[in-house]
């Protein structure tokens, strides 16, 4: 097979590009300077850590709970196939992860989440498993995994691994046995049903991926089997206690090895209606479900019987019983494809349920505004009143952060680099945990089809089936660009990577951003390391300020720290009146600029477009009296 290697930028072009970026960064830093000598200031990295031996939090019933690491963790998601290839076959592997553990540590994250590396035909990126305890040779061996786990722990990183319990591969030994006949020992381990009298599928359920019937004919049994995603991923029957017991025993194997928790794939698909009733049609005036593309045929139905069943809550209890045998471990559930992602995700969290869930609340296809953030955070506070919330804005299924929120502001202008710098800080200051998808810290945008990925090189079965109506998921799965001076950005030494690397990604390679202190990569590092020293951010309460658009403001508070956070979410200069706060200590050194102005006896802080202001308030301050006087556009 022949391939064309990406063009490597010429040295003088790189130097010109770096110089232009440097000039822009200097202009951004010097245009607005902090000049008020009366304020007590210090660089954030020189501040002592305000910490306690243990921390507690209060729920909505004023009950105190011991804090856990996972409640505020930043979790770095790794797709091994696209991270780093160590053996030159064009596909990433576990040894590649080991090779880059120092890079992961440099980010300042708390844990890594490893996508599936189990034995699999790879019909769906490894989410079609044939052995839940085996490592696929494509990724290495169980010895490689144990070595990676030990090294990660020695570096202070916790390790969470994917668990796919809703379905298996159709080549799994369980399914091969189940499909033989109706009497074998695994006959009821999957969801089988007779056809209707006319020979058609049992009901109108649709595949979440393929958009057509969720039933596939099995001629050996003369029955249909159910699948929610691909026909090669038959759903396990979670109504069968033997299935649940066996699956959890497989999970126990990894807990015994020392993993720190599981990311649980699609738990809201575990249970189905045993009566196999038809899903009702979605009324014209019903809201669109969360986490689903509007052109996916499944949106024509309400998600009532095929998945998102109330029986799921009871099933989660079995999982929690297992995890409680291993203190300090966590379950992180994916609850994105549903009618109301925040509401359902919060229902899955509790002492006898999952520890934490992430949702698709921030994946709205609309410009990012202060009003949108206030709405989402108000809803989050209403539902996640017992903790356990986790944020996600990019991953292997839902695209990249850089391509989020239409890519344009409310005026139709493309977001500037300053916007993404500001959003980095905002996302990391929200209460709860956060999942950071590999490459998002580099500011990678989604690959384009066919410009970056030719149609004939699409790998995603979802994309293959529905392109061009739906572009699929390859656009966020392209390999990581490590070094712009090497072929294929040093991802692989093979003749061709498993997916093409876009040219515009090479310009954002790690080696280029490492040397620029104001790169988006170093902004992520700076905010992440600062975050670790802020008990109010890692463990504190969250109070939204009643401040007018386009400013989004809140206070994080815990123990001795009370942190004021103001974000200018517009492309215009904003002034905020801080006269209410007699004392405050601005946070310095994070790379964001502002200016203090005294006007008519008022103390104002002026924020440039897409900038922010952090300040520590006196711990004794009454939070009920801490609302800002006003924020407004700068007078022309």
Image (cartoon, grey):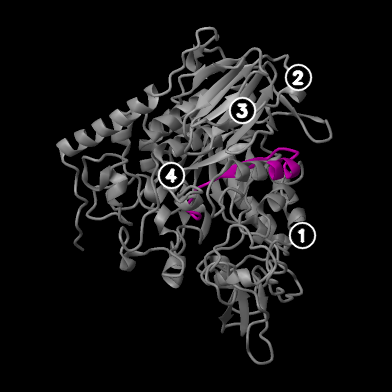
x then y, percent, for residue 450: 32, 63
State the residue at coordinates (65%, 73%): 187
Label 1, label 4: how many angstroms apart (C-alpha)? 41 Å
Characterize the local packing of mark 2: few (<14), some (14-19) or many (20 or more) Cα atoms within 10 angstroms: few
Asked if disc 2 and disc 4 are in contact, CB closer than 8 Å, the reply is no
Q: Is residue 388 left or right of residue 391?
A: right
- Looking at the image, tell me whether mark 2 or mark 4 is earlier in sequence order: 4
- Residue 87 visible in this rendered orientation of the protein: no
> Which residue in the structure is indicated by mark 2?
622
Which numbered disc, 3 or 2, marks the residue closer to the eye? 2
Q: Is residue 481 left or right of residue 61?
A: left
Residue closer to the observer: 485 or 193:
485
Q: Secondary structure at mark 4?
A: loop
Characterize the local packing of mark 4: few (<14), some (14-19) or many (20 or more) Cα atoms within 10 angstroms: many
Q: Magenta stretch: give its range.
A: 378-399
Dividing the picture into quarters, in which one does residue 8 lie? top left
Residue closer to the observer: 482 or 165:
482
Characterize the local packing of mark 3: few (<14), some (14-19) or many (20 or more) Cα atoms within 10 angstroms: many
Q: Secondary structure at mark 1?
A: loop
Asked if disc 3 and disc 2 are in contact, CB closer than 8 Å, the reply is no
> Which residue in the structure is indicated by mark 4?
415
Asked if disc 1 and disc 3 are in contact, CB closer than 8 Å, the reply is no
- Looking at the image, tell me whether mark 3 or mark 2 is earlier in sequence order: 3
């Amino acid at each position: 097979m022949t391939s064309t290697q990406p063009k490597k930028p010429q040295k003088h072009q790189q130097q010109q590009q770096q110089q232009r970026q440097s000039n822009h960064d200097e202009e951004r830093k010097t245009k607005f300077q902090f000049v008020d000598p009366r304020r007590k200031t210090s660089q954030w990295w020189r501040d002592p850590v305000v910490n306690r031996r243990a921390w507690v939090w209060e729920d909505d019933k004023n009950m105190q709970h011991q804090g856990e690491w996972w409640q505020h963790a930043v979790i770095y998601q790794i797709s091994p196939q696209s991270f780093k290839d160590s053996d030159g076959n064009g596909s990433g592997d576990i040894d590649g992860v080991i090779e880059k553990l120092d890079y992961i540590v440099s980010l300042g994250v708390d844990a890594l989440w490893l996508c599936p590396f189990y034995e699999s035909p790879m019909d769906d990126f490894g989410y079609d498993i044939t052995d839940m305890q085996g490592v696929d040779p494509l990724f290495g061996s169980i010895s490689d995994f144990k070595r990676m786990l030990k090294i990660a722990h020695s570096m202070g990183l916790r390790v969470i691994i994917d668990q796919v319990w809703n379905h298996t591969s159709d080549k799994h030994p369980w399914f091969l046995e189940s499909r033989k006949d109706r009497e074998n020992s695994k006959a009821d381990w999957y969801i089988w049903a007779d056809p209707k009298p006319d020979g058609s599928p049992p009901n109108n359920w649709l595949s979440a991926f393929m958009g057509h019937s969720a039933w596939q004919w099995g001629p050996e049994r003369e029955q249909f089997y159910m699948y929610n995603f691909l026909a090669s991923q038959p759903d396990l029957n979670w109504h069968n206690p033997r299935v649940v017991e066996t699956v959890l025993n497989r999970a126990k194997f990894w807990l015994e090895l020392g993993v720190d928790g599981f990311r649980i794939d699609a738990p809201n698909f575990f249970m189905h209606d045993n009566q196999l009733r038809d899903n009702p049609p979605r009324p014209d005036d019903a809201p669109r479900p969360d986490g689903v593309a509007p052109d996916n045929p499944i949106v024509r139905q309400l998600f009532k019987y095929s998945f998102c069943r109330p029986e799921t809550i009871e099933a989660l209890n079995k999982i929690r019983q297992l995890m409680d045998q291993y203190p300090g471990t966590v379950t992180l559930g994916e609850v994105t494809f549903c009618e109301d992602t925040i509401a359902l995700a919060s229902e899955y969290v509790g002492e006898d349920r999952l520890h934490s869930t992430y949702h698709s609340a921030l994946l709205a296809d609309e410009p990012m505004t202060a009003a949108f953030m206030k709405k989402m955070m108000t809803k989050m506070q209403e539902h996640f009143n017992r903790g356990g919330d986790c944020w996600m804005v990019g991953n292997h299924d839902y695209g990249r952060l850089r391509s989020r929120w239409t890519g344009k502001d409310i005026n139709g202008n493309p977001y500037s680099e300053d916007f993404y710098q500001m959003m980095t800080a905002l996302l990391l200051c929200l209460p709860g945990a956060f999942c950071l998808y590999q490459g998002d810290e580099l500011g990678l945008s989604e690959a384009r089809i066919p410009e970056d990925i030719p149609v004939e090189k699409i790998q995603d079965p979802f994309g293959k089936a529905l392109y061009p109506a739906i572009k699929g998921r390859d656009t966020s799965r392209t390999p990581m660009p490590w070094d712009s001076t090497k072929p294929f950005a040093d991802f692989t030494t093979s003749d061709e990577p498993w997916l093409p690397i876009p040219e515009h990604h090479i310009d954002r390679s790690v080696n280029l951003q490492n040397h620029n202190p104001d790169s988006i990569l170093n902004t992520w590092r700076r905010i992440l390391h600062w975050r670790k020293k802020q008990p109010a951010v890692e463990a504190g309460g969250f109070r939204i300020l009643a401040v007018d658009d386009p400013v989004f403001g809140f206070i994080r508070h815990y123990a001795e720290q009370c942190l004021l956070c103001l974000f200018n979410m517009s492309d215009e200069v904003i002034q905020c009146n801080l006269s209410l706060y007699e004392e405050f200590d601005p946070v310095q050194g994070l790379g964001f600029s502002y200016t203090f102005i005294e006007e008519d006896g008022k103390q104002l802080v002026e924020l440039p477009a897409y900038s922010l202001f952090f300040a520590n308030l006196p711990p004794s301050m009454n939070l009920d009296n801490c609302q800002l006087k006003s924020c407004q556009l700068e007078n022309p």
